[in-house]
Image (cartoon, rainbow, N blue to C red):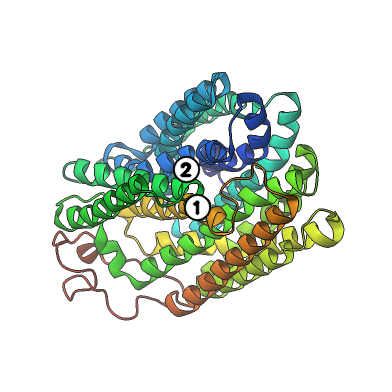
Amino acid sequence: MGTAGGRWVLAATIGGSSMAMLDSTVVNVALARIGEDLGAGFTTLQWISNAYTLTLASFILVGGVLGDRYGRRRVFVIGTVWFGLASAACALAPTAELLVAARALQGVGGALLAPGSLAIISATFERTDRARAIGAWSGLGGVAAALGPFLGGWLVILDWRLVFLINVPVAAMVALIAVRHVPETGRGAAAGRLDLAGTVCIVGALSTTTYALTTAGSAGWTTAVVLVGAIAVALWVAFVLVERRSASPLVPLSLFANRVFAAANVATALMYAALAVYFFLVVLQLQLVAGWSPVAAGTAILPATLLMLLLSARAGALSERIGPRPLMTLGTLLAGAGFAAGTRIGPDASYLTDVLPSVLLLGLGLSCAVSPLTAAVLGAAPESMVGAASGVNNAVARSAGLLAIAVIPGLVGLASLEGLEPAVVQSGFVEALWIGAGLMAAAALVSVLGVPKRRVTPLPREIAVHKDTCCPVGAPSLAPPADRTTG
C-alpha cells in the first residue's frame, strides 16, 4: 500500500471499476431528460437502465474467467477501451432504441473490466495489505457510484449526452495507466476450454428473465410473456446442468461448497437488489414528486459519498482483524434503517429532516458492509480462482439489481409512470423502500448465520478446483471441513 507500484495499481483498478459503477447510477438522473428528448416511455427508460446491467451481469462471469486464462491486465485494458467506445456510441445515439443497444454494448465492456480490477488487487497486494487495498477499492468505487447522481445532475443541465461522453477521456487515461504500471497476473491460471455452452445459457437466461419480468410489469402476464418466462426457467436449469458437467465451468460450483462463499453471495444478492431500488427510485421521486431539479436530486446523495470515502478503507482493515460478520451485519442493518427513513420523502420533502437522515444511514451502512463482504468472498477462494470468484460475486450483485428493477416497480404499481397521480407514485415509492428495508434485514440475518466472526481461510486447492463438478454441491467429495476459519 505504501509503494508507488501499489498506488498505480489502485489508481488503475479504482478508476476502471469506478467508471463502470458510476455509469450505473449517473444515468438514473438523466432518464427523465432522455425520455423527454427521445420520446421514451417508462418501460423504455427501464430498458435504458437494464440493457447495461443485463449484459454486465451476463458477461461478467466470462470476464473473470478470461482474466484468469489470458491475463487480468490484458482483459482489463480491453474492457476499458471497449467501455469508452461504447460510451461514445451512447452519446451519439439518435433514438431511444439505438441508445438501448449502445448501453448493452457498454455493459459488455464493463463486464470485462469489473472482475479484473478486483482480481488484480487480490493477486498483486500482499496478504497483510489486501484488506486495506480492497477497502480503498470498494470505498472509492462506492464514492463513484454515489457521485453519479450528483455529477449527472450538473451534466444533464448542459446536455444528457455528456453523461456518456465524459467516460471517453477517463477510459483512455485508465487504459494508459494500466498498460504502463500494472503487472500482468493470472495468465494460464485457468485451464481447459472456455465454457461457451455455459455462457450461452447464462446470457439467454438473464435476458429472457429480465424481458419477461419487465414486460409483465407493464403489459401483464400475456401468453407471450408466459412463454418467454418458461424459456427462462428452462435456460436456468440448463445452465446448472451444463456447469455441473463441464470440465472447465464458467461458474465453478465447487466454490459454493465453502459455506462462507455461498452465504456472502446470498447477502450480496439481497443487498444489491435493495440498493438498485434505492438509487433508481429515490432520484426519480425527488424530481417527479418532490419537484426538485436534477442537480438538487443528485446532490442529495452526496453525504453518502463522503462517508464511504472516509470509512470504507478503515472498515476493510478492521474486518481483517475482527472478521467480516460484525461489520456486514451492522452495515446492512444501518442501510435498512436508511431505507425506512427514506419513506418520509414526499411532495413537500425537507432535505434536513426527510432526505439527509436516510442518506447518512445508507452511507454508514455501505461503508461498514461493502468492504468486508468483498473480502469475505475473495478470502474464501484460492489464488488461482480469484478472477472467477470476483466474476461470480459481481454477477450476483448485478443480476440482483437487474431483477429488482424489473420486478419491484411493477409490484408496487410503478410499472408505468404515465398518467399516474403523484399520490399513487408516492404510495408505490414508500412500498418499494419498505421492500428494500426488508431485503437489507434479510442480508443481515444471512451474515449472522453464514459468515464467521473471524478471518476467512480459502478452500484448499485440491477441493476448490475439484473436477468432479457433477457431484451435488456439498457432497462429501467437495465439502470443506465444517470450520474454515482461523483465529
Up/down of 414 relative to 92, above or below: below
Q: Is residue 427 found left or right of 457 in the rendered image?
A: right
Whether residues under marks 2 and 1 lie with C-beta atoms below 8 angstroms apart, the answer is yes
Q: Which residue is drawn at 46% across and 26% down?
A: 81
Residue placed under numbered mark 1 in the picture: 401
Up/down of 148 relative to 255, above or below: above
Up/down of 162 relative to 326, above or below: above
Residue 239 drawn at (x, y percent): 24, 52
Residue placed under numbered mark 2 in the picture: 53
Q: Is residue 235 found left or right of 367 in the rendered image?
A: left
Q: Which residue is drawn at 63% across and 30% down?
A: 34
Residue 361 drawn at (x, y percent): 71, 64
Tell which of 84 and 101 is nearer to you.
Answer: 101
Q: What residue type is labelled 1?
A: Gly
Q: Which residue is drawn at 26% across and 43% down?
A: 199
Count of all numbered marks drawn on residues in the image: 2
Q: Which amino acid does label 2 sit on?
A: Thr
Q: The C terminus is located in which quarter? A: bottom left
